[in-house]
Amino acid sequence: MDVSVWRGDASGGRFQRFEVPARTSQTVLDVVAWIQQNADPTLSYRFACRVGMCGSCAMMVNGQPRWTCRTHVDRVTSDGRLEIAPLRNLAVIKDLAADMDPFFEKWVTAEAVFHPARSRDEAVERVNPDDPARQQVDAAIECINCAICYAACDTVAANPDYLGPAALNRAWTLVNDTKDAGRTAVLDAVSGAGGCHNCHSMGSCAQFCPNELNPMNAIAGLKRATARRFLGG
Amino acid sequence: MIRPHRSHPLWFAFLLHRVSGALLALFLPAHFLVLATALTSPQALDGALAWTDNTLVKLAEFGLVFLLAVHALGGLRLLALEFLPWTSGQKTLAASAVALAVLVSGTFFLSAV
């Protein structure tokens, strides 16, 4: 198998080719690990759980953002050629490891952090799974912070201040969460210059989300909520 | 420009909307300029109207109507997508209904011409 792997750091780099033996049920992460263990031990990349839970192994595979641990090689290449690069829209630390700091900082900027409503002395808030607002939360809650949507998004590429699909998706879950007391703060944070109204509904976030979430829908929800608030509703 | 992460229908819908919008933005100032000559210089307006009888201009007007239709429908699509909280199943049904309507009306249109 002919594998091109991006080598370099924030100042620049180039693709380096490796010949990697093809195996059955081989994942893209297996390919990267094989190169690091057998061809070039200086190759840097990031992974942890290997089972699609931790969200740390996302990379660009043949130009598309993928969770490499759950992406079988034979699903993404037909001619035995692979091009593996660090996630788009983020600076590179080294080789395949992208700098995730701006991605996580935007979660905080979007107020996509839990705002407690009750103290430990009060009863736990009841969560009704049949409540329509709760169903909105449930549809968007399984984000693993892998930044695949962030790498897929052309609005992020065009506007460095745009908070991005993942942070806005999390903000939408909080807006609908009865346990969260920060609805006003969240809506303020997501209606600013880099907020939800930047989204052009290109849908790449939903197209590539490995957990089949739809951040575009969540952002549309934020657009409705902020518009309703602006109109005094 | 159509890189691998962009090859899906919603991105193409965005591209179509953006390109049609940009082309209409180029057309509109020229359109208003010509209309304004009705007040300042009627002869110039008559000249411009005579120019639009040109076959090439008539053909270009088909393109203009196409751009207007595409951009208007694209705008309605965005409003529906963003301001109506539809589930993805409902969106599929709506898109199928539009496709079916285009097919049926297109068939009638083709048999009429």
Image (spheres, coloured by chain):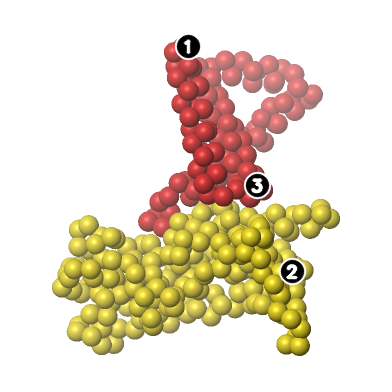
> Do badges 2 and 3 share one subunit?
no
Which x, y percent locates residue B98? 52, 33
Bin the neighbour count of mark 1 within 10 Å (Cα to Cα): few under 14, some 14-19, many 20 and up: few
User: What shade does chain A have?
Assistant: yellow
Which x, y percent locates residue A167? 59, 70
Question: What separation in Å lies between label 3 and label 1 (alpha carbons)?
Answer: 36 Å
Dot 2 amino acid type: Arg
Q: Residue furthest top?
A: B112
Identify the secondary structure beneath mark 2: helix
The chain holding disc 1 is B
Instruction: Please report contact status of discs 3 and 1: CB closer than 8 Å, yes or no.
Output: no
Dot 3 amino acid type: Leu
Q: What residue appears at the point 74 percent right and 81 percent down from the top-left corner? A: A123
Seen in the picture, residue A114 relative to A196 is either above or below; the reply is below
Screen quadrant of the C terminus of chain A = bottom right
Instruction: Please report contact status of discs 2 and 3: CB closer than 8 Å, yes or no.
Output: no
Seen in the picture, residue A165 relative to B100 is either above or below; the reply is below
Identify the secondary structure beneath mark 1: helix
Q: Is residue B43 left or right of residue A107?
A: right
| Residue located beneath label 3 in the image | B84
Bin the neighbour count of mark 2 within 10 Å (Cα to Cα): few under 14, some 14-19, many 20 and up: some
> Do badges 3 and 1 share one subunit?
yes
User: What shade does chain B have?
Assistant: red
- The answer to whether residue A128 of the structure is visible from this angle is yes
Q: What residue appears at the point 58 percent right and 31 percent down from the top-left corner? A: B69
| Residue located beneath label 1 in the image | B112
Q: Is residue B12 left or right of residue A192?
A: left
Identify the secondary structure beneath mark 3: loop
Q: What residue appears at the point 68 percent right and 16 percent down from the top-left corner? A: B46
Q: Is residue A118 left or right of residue A100?
A: right
